[in-house]
């Protein structure tokens, strides 16, 4: 999978931009604030319809403009298609080859992307909700059914929470209806659990080897924590035991919306014992293992974005990372210091210099 052309209109600090990319390595360099991260943010948005830095789409629209358009020509399965994301104050629309796609779940599984972003290193110590969010994004890129399951689960969860509050306030509402909602939570939750468990197991097939090849030593693995590692009968009994407690709290206390996963290095929890360097190394390995998972399932490599990687690692580790990458992985690298990029990598790369919202390719 490759992106050959990118067109931006009123996106961040780019009023009008047209770029052609090479199939392998693309280096984007410039000073902080020049717009290099905005460029890879646009590529990420083209794939997943959202930013990796902002929660509000409207912030992506250039100041004093009414809308923004991100458009790209992407090669997949030996065929080119044009993808477009249109954002305005009225909302967001997506198209493939000028055909409007009504469901986001139909769009985001078309283009796969793996991103390393410096703030990702906080993932180990962040809240479980942030780790679940990352997990949901990665699985949703591969399986559109997963997105649909998540949507259905969240709808039932909202209904169940509202009904628990009603039971607490009025007391005479039907417990039978609560059982019905609980069984629906179980139905969707067990399927989501299965997807997550399989994805974590796939990660563990690759992450140990990736970590050792980059950093020389250490056994890294991911441990998935979920209350849904029980039979449906056991879970239903457990729910019924805590009905009164749930009513008092006005929310569902058990479910895949409480799942979490941990990074374990040499038998120790990284969250408790890891150094800053080890946390960083774990996340990089986590991201690179995802490339192998996507390729093994979809028989195609994702686009890889390494945002400011060279400020995070020394040259030997950088070289080890690029030894791991298949030549078919189109990679975008941002950096403020081109001299930190190993010579062998620069020789293989197309190099783009960013200056205040304008870009030129370095020959």
Image (tube, rainbow, N blue to C red):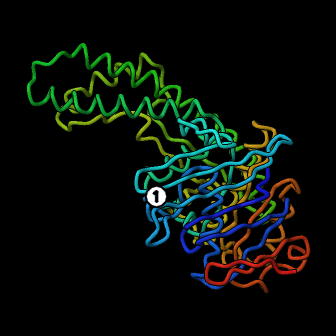
Q: Is residue 119 visible?
A: yes
Residue pointed to by mark 1: 57
Q: Is residue 139 visible?
A: no
Where is residue 157 drawn, in percent x and y?
34, 32
Corner quadrant of residue 253? top left
Answer above or below: position of 43 versus 99. below
> Which residue is at a point 25% across and 16% down the rendered structure image?
177
Q: Residue 273: x percent and y percent?
A: 54, 64
Q: Nearer the viewer, residue 103 or 132?
A: 103
Q: Residue furthest top?
A: 176
The residue depicted at 37 percent of the width and 31 percent of the height is: 155
Q: Residue 43: image x %, image y %?
A: 66, 59
Q: Is residue 119 left or right of residue 180?
A: right
Q: Is residue 3 left or right of residue 363?
A: left
Where residue 270 appears, as percent x and y from the top left, is 56, 60
Q: Secondary structure at mark 1?
A: helix
Q: Residues within 10 Å of mark 1 (few under 14, many from 20)?
A: some
Front-most of residues 235 and 303: 303
Q: Horizontally, is 31 left or right of 73 in the view?
A: left
User: What quarter of the picture does the C terminus occupy?
Assistant: bottom right
Identify whether 164 is placed above or below 100: above
Left or right of 100, for residue 63? left
């Amino acid at each position: 999978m490759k992106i050959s052309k990118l067109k931006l209109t009123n996106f961040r600090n780019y009023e009008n931009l047209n770029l052609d990319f090479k199939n392998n390595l693309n280096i984007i360099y410039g000073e902080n604030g020049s717009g290099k991260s905005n460029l890879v943010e646009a590529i990420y948005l083209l794939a997943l319809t959202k930013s990796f830095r902002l929660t509000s789409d409207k912030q992506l629209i250039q100041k004093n403009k009414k809308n923004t358009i991100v458009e790209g020509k992407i090669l997949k399965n030996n065929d080119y298609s044009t993808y477009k994301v249109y954002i305005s104050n009225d909302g967001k629309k997506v198209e493939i080859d000028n055909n409007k796609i009504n469901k986001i779940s139909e769009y985001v599984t078309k283009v796969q992307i793996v991103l390393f972003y410096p703030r990702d290193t906080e993932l180990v110590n962040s809240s479980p909700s942030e780790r679940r969010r990352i997990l949901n994004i990665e699985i949703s890129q591969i399986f559109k059914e997963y997105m649909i399951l998540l949507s259905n689960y969240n709808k039932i969860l909202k209904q169940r929470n509202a009904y628990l509050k009603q039971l607490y306030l009025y007391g005479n509402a039907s417990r039978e209806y609560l059982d019905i909602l609980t069984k629906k939570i179980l139905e969707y939750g067990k399927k989501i659990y299965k997807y997550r468990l399989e994805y974590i197991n796939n990660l563990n097939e690759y992450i140990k080897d990736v970590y050792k090849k980059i950093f020389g030593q250490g056994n890294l693995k991911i441990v998935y924590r979920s209350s849904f590692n029980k039979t449906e009968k056991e879970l239903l009994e457990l729910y019924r035991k805590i009905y009164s407690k749930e009513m008092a709290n006005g929310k569902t206390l058990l479910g895949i919306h409480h799942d979490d996963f941990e990074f374990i290095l040499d038998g120790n929890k990284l969250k408790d014992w890891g150094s800053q360097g080890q946390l960083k190394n774990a996340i990089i390995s986590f991201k690179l293992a995802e490339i192998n998972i996507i390729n093994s399932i979809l028989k195609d490599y994702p686009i890889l974005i390494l945002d400011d990687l060279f400020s995070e690692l020394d040259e030997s580790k950088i070289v080890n990372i690029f030894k791991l990458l298949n030549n078919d992985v189109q990679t975008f690298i941002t950096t403020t210091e081109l001299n930190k990029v190993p010579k062998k990598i620069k020789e293989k790369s197309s190099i783009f210099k960013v200056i205040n919202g304008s870009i030129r390719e370095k020959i």
